Amino acid sequence: MNRSVVAAALSALLVLQGPTPACRADERRPNVIVILADDQGSVDLGCYGAQDLHTPHLDALASRGVRFTQFYSAAPVCSPSRAGLLTGRWPVRAGVPNNCASQAGGAGALPPDEITLAEMFRESGYVTAHIGKWHVGFTPTTLPNAQGFDHSFGHMGGCIDNFSHFFYWSGPNIHDLWRNGVEVHHDGEFFPDLMAREAVQFVQQHRDRPLFLYYALNTPHYPYQGDAKWLKHFEHLPQPRRLYAAFLAAQDERIGTLLKAVDALSLRERTIIVFQSDNGHSTEERAHFGGGSGGPYRGAKFSLFEAGIRSPAIISWPGQVPENEVRNQVGHACDWLPTLAELAGVKPPPAPLDGRSLATVIRDPQAPSPHAAHPLHWQIGTGPKADWAVRDGDWKLIGHTRDTTDGRKSVDVANYLVNVAADPAEQMNLADRHPEIVARLRKLHDEHLD
């Protein structure tokens, strides 16, 4: 048979079979949007039981996805938490044991050789963007564009005033607003609005190819600057809950702007959306000593008690993962990288990961948590004065931490053992009753450090 006949036969066969899967536009890899809130309390969403807040868009996201009740941030403070989420590795292993610089050129950053979510997705053909807060490096080699992001817009330090875009919390005051490494000025414009506008433009411009968006909110981190309409709406609440509630409603409204744009482009069914908070609510003086809530849990930001590290967490991908379901299995921020790699069908980085994929748990309510076999570790700082904790099964040992439940008088706590299932409020220290469990968990921590 001559070549022309063979070619004709193959062409006819391809027509009958239709295009190969790689050619089908509807089978391209899914978009991924990771939304990270800043200092949002463990139970501060309507879907987590809050009765005095207005969070319809995140509540709707939970109704179209899976909501976790035992999900942990990688740390009780900003930079280490973000490093864990971005790399899938314990923050100490990822080189970020403490908060990073909020001044250009300052010390402290996610090392350039760490592989981020953005680098993982870009390697698989995704266009990538960081929009919002960074706070894991303020030098040329550690800014977002050097860490896998094709596009970046936001502030590089720990927080800003939402209208002047200045960082005022350690001198000298600096203007901190950047687009792809170039300082930009939007004086007087509300930063959450700038974020939403930038994100919508990114999604619109790249609607025809897989995209990864790290939407790193600076809300409801202080300074509390909710819209006047929301301050009026919540005027019946006591301070500082009123300030916090107004700012959280403003946050939810801008998240709604992004989600509506995704819907308008008919992208929701091909977009994985993840939401969590970086750590618990703040009880710092700068946050009026509170406003957020840990609900039944003890502690707050900076603390390794539950309210410092237990986070609201949601994943939604309509048609691909269950909708309006709850998972009580343990999950952790480091789990998102391997989870998203598995769900999106991309190759995870070769570096050893501490996170474990939650894909099976997300799809099956009966599946065991991967952390049944892999204990969770937290550490802030290094050396003998570091704060640390380990959880294995229902047992959690806090080697050292601060109880920041009351920001006016935080208390040092050491060698504190609790059974989280029996005592989620962590009111009873069982270390003296179970020295053998203390010894076992302390050994796990020592092996983790090695």
Image (cartoon, rainbow, N blue to C red):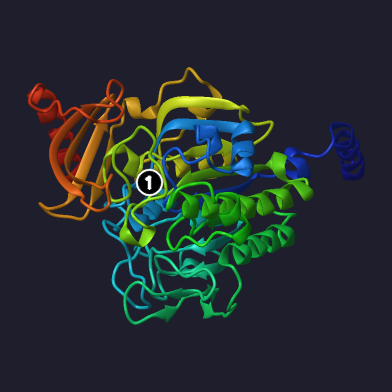
The answer to which image quadrant residue 21 occupies is top right
Classify mark 1: residues with Cα within 10 Å, few (<14), some (14-19) or many (20+): many
Q: Quadrant of the C terminus?
A: top left
Q: Residue at x 67, y 34 (%)?
A: 318
**Residue 304 versus residue 116: which sits nearer the camera?**
304
Residue placed farthest to the top in the image? Answer: 366
Residue 439, position as x, y percentages in the image: 10, 29
Q: Residue at x 33, y 25 (%)?
A: 372
Residue 19, position as x, y percentages in the image: 81, 39
- Residue identifier under label 1: 280
Residue 118, position as x, y percentages in the image: 51, 56
Rendered position, 318 above or below 209: above
Position of residue 269 in the picture relative to residue 365 (left or right): right
Q: Amino acid at mark 1?
A: Gly
Position of residue 442 in the picture relative to residue 355 (left or right): left
| Residue 212 in view | no
Total marks in image: 1
**Residue 116 versus residue 235: which sits nearer the camera?**
235
Residue 178, position as x, y percentages in the image: 52, 75
**Residue 73 versus residue 339: which sits nearer the camera?**
73
